[in-house]
């Protein structure tokens, strides 16, 4: 075959292949990129009773979403008490966000937890005029996950997550036993209720001290308790609040605090309850399972 004929045959074959590719593409449709703005569970909404597990991305798994990015000034720290940590939340324009809505009495809630759950802190950083948040954390060696729970003015609420590495010899905690009773500073907190994927689960936490029910819990962040749930493994984040509010005429200040929580999937979860009594906030930790994934 002459050279001109070989070139013509090649071009014809190429056109045929291209035509098949276009046809397939039009049939299947374009492959959409992963959406940075995929909706994440912010934690205040209640799933419908009996709803199927959600396909939405749970809160805290992404460092960036809907154009907002959680930027730690330094992703590694030395261990110690009151270690300074600072960060910004940048908006869709790439600039630090400086305007936030107040949610549960604060503009931003920062949760810090070591990945083996040996440490948990819920703090409220200070916001500078340039959009820099700063706070102090008590850090032990290991890998930590930080969650920024916030609502930028004009946007919907988000929970973004970022990793923080703390140097030093790490001795991981090994605790895979279900725990429904927690003791802290002489208080005993018991958990009643079972988590269910994709549906509201009623969780009742009862606070006692020295065997006596605590009936004068104090409001903390506008409620008698504050509950955070984290899925073991990826640390998917669920932020829930109790049923009722102080001063509504029907919600008692203890000994029981009731929550409604919907976890995104079956699995093992860690729950952390913050409650305030006699002027001090304490944290009670629990380990429970949803579905067939108990501890």
Image (spheres, rainbow, N blue to C red):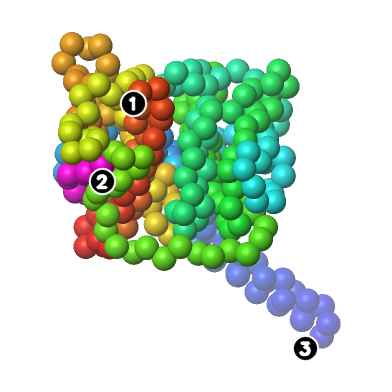
Contact? badges 2 and 3 (CB < 8 Å): no
Visible residue check, residue 124: yes
**Residue 207 drawn at (x, y percent):** 23, 35
Callout 3 environment at 10 Å: few (<14), some (14 to 19), or many (20+)? few
Residue 189 falls inside the magenta stretch: yes
Label 2 vs 1, first from the N-terminus: 2
Q: What residue is disc 1 on?
A: 277
Tell which tag, 2 or 3, sits nearer the viewer.
2
Instruction: Please tell me which residue is depicted at 51% across the width and 52% down the height of the picture.
Output: 114
Tell which tag, 1 or 3, sits nearer the viewer.
1
Q: Separation of disc 2 and disc 3 at Cα?
A: 67 Å
Element under disc 2: loop
Instruction: Please tell me which residue is depicted at 29% across the width and 38% down the height of the picture.
Output: 187
Q: Separation of disc 1 and disc 3 at Cα?
A: 93 Å
72 relative to 247 in the view: left or right? right
Tell which tag, 2 or 1, sits nearer the viewer.
1
Residue extent of the magenta highlight: 188-196
272 relative to 12 in the view: left or right? left
Element under disc 3: loop
Q: Residue furthest front?
A: 210
Residue 3 falls inside the magenta stretch: no
Visible residue check, residue 62: no
Identify the mark at residue 1; answer none if there is no mark.
Answer: 3
Instruction: Please tell me which residue is depicted at 23% across the width and 38% down the height of the picture.
Output: 210
**Residue 279 drawn at (x, y percent):** 40, 22
Callout 2 environment at 10 Å: few (<14), some (14 to 19), or many (20+)? many
Q: What residue is disc 2 on?
A: 198
Quadrant placement of the N terminus? bottom right
Reply above or below: 252 against 291: above
Contact? badges 2 and 1 (CB < 8 Å): no
Q: Nearer the viewer, residue 154 or 292?
A: 292
């Amino acid at each position: 075959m002459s050279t001109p004929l070989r070139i013509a045959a090649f071009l014809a074959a190429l056109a045929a292949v291209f035509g098949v590719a276009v046809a397939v593409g039009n049939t299947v449709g374009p492959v959409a990129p992963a959406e940075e703005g995929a909706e994440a569970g912010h934690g205040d909404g209640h799933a419908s009773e009996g709803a199927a597990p959600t396909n939405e991305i749970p809160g805290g798994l992404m460092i960036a979403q809907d154009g907002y990015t959680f930027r730690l000034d330094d992703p590694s720290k030395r261990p110690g008490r009151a270690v300074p940590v600072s960060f910004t939340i940048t908006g869709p324009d790439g600039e630090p966000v400086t305007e936030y809505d107040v949610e549960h009495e604060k503009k931003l809630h920062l949760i810090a937890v070591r990945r083996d759950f040996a440490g948990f802190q819920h703090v409220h950083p200070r916001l500078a005029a340039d959009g820099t948040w700063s706070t102090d954390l008590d850090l032990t060696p290991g890998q930590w996950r930080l969650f920024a729970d916030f609502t930028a003015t004009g946007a919907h609420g988000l929970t973004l997550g970022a990793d923080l590495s703390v140097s030093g010899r790490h001795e991981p905690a090994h605790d895979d036993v279900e725990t429904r009773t927690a003791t802290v500073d002489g208080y005993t907190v018991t958990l009643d209720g079972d988590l269910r994927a994709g549906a509201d689960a009623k969780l009742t936490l009862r606070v006692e001290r020295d065997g006596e029910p605590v009936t004068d819990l104090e409001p903390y962040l506008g409620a008698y308790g504050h509950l955070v749930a984290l899925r073991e493994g990826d640390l998917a984040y669920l932020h829930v609040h109790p049923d009722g509010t102080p001063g509504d005429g029907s919600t008692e200040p203890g000994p029981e605090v009731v929550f409604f929580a919907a976890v995104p999937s079956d699995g093992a979860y860690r729950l952390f309850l913050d409650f305030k009594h006699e002027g001090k906030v304490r944290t009670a930790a629990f380990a429970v399972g949803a579905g067939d994934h108990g501890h």
